[in-house]
Amino acid sequence: MAKKDVEPSKIKISIIPPPESTVKQIDDVFIVITEAYCPNGHNLISNNNVDFDGYPGIKVNLKNGGKEGIIYLSPFQGDGTKKGFHDWADGERLQFFCPECNTPLPKVAHCSCTATDNDHGDIIKIYTSKELSDQSYLSLCNVWGCPKSRVTDNWEIISEYLEGEIID
């Protein structure tokens, strides 16, 4: 569906996730991702992962050319902090894989940013429920250093699409 076909007045965007969601609101301030799955159902969050203020990060394997490395993304909604392998140049387009089964993480849409190869970035999907439903996922840009690159819940991706933050 193209952006021009979306009628903003008919879209309801939830600010607070429902109680059954794996995206949690903590202390009425923070939303923390507590489960994150690859397309094969491997949980990318475990207590053995690098810690972000007491919460385990989201573990992904990044690749580009001959370089490869594990990185941990902050589980806090809107926090772009990353820990782990950082040998990437700003603007470098990366491929995201499950560190358990090496399955590529699926693309949702194009990002409006521009990579160093003068092409757009891609928004990558990480499921937030064991059901692997398109109703529950995180999204992030695959371009290192993209200012829009952050963990985004599925409620915000609709508003970002309508505001032109992601493109067809």
Image (cartoon, grey):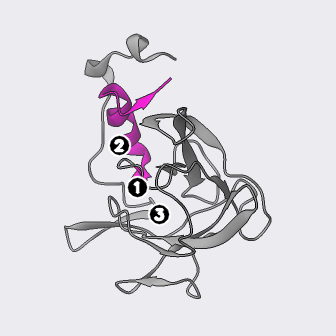
Question: Between residues 45 and 115, which one lies in front from this camera angle?
Answer: 115
Mark 2 or 1, nearer chain start: 1
- Given contact means CB atoms under 8 Å apart, are the residues at marks 2 and 1 in contact? no
Query: Closer to us: mark 2 or mark 1?
Result: 1
Label 2 sits on what residue type? Glu
Q: Name the residue under label 1.
A: 150
Secondary structure category for the residue under label 1: loop
Q: Is residue 156 left or right of residue 131?
A: left
Q: Distance between the residues labelled 1 and 3?
A: 17 Å
Read off the residue under disc 2: 156
For the residues labelled 1 and 3, say whether their Cβ atoms are less than 8 Å apart: no
Q: What residue type is labelled 1?
A: Arg
The reply to whether the magenta stretch includes residue 155 is: yes
Say which of 1 and 133 sits in front: 1
Looking at the rendering, the stretch of residues picked out in magenta corresponds to 149-168
Marks 2/1: CA–CA distance: 11 Å
Q: Counting other residues with Cα less than 10 Å from the Cα at mark 3, is it few (<14), some (14-19), or many (20 or more)?
A: many
- Residue 5 lies, in percent from the top left, at 42, 11
Image depth: mark 1 or mark 3 in front: 1
Q: Do the residues labelled 2 and 3 touch (CB within 8 Å)?
A: no
Nearer-the-camera pick, 28 or 99: 99
Relative side of 52 to 72, left or right: left
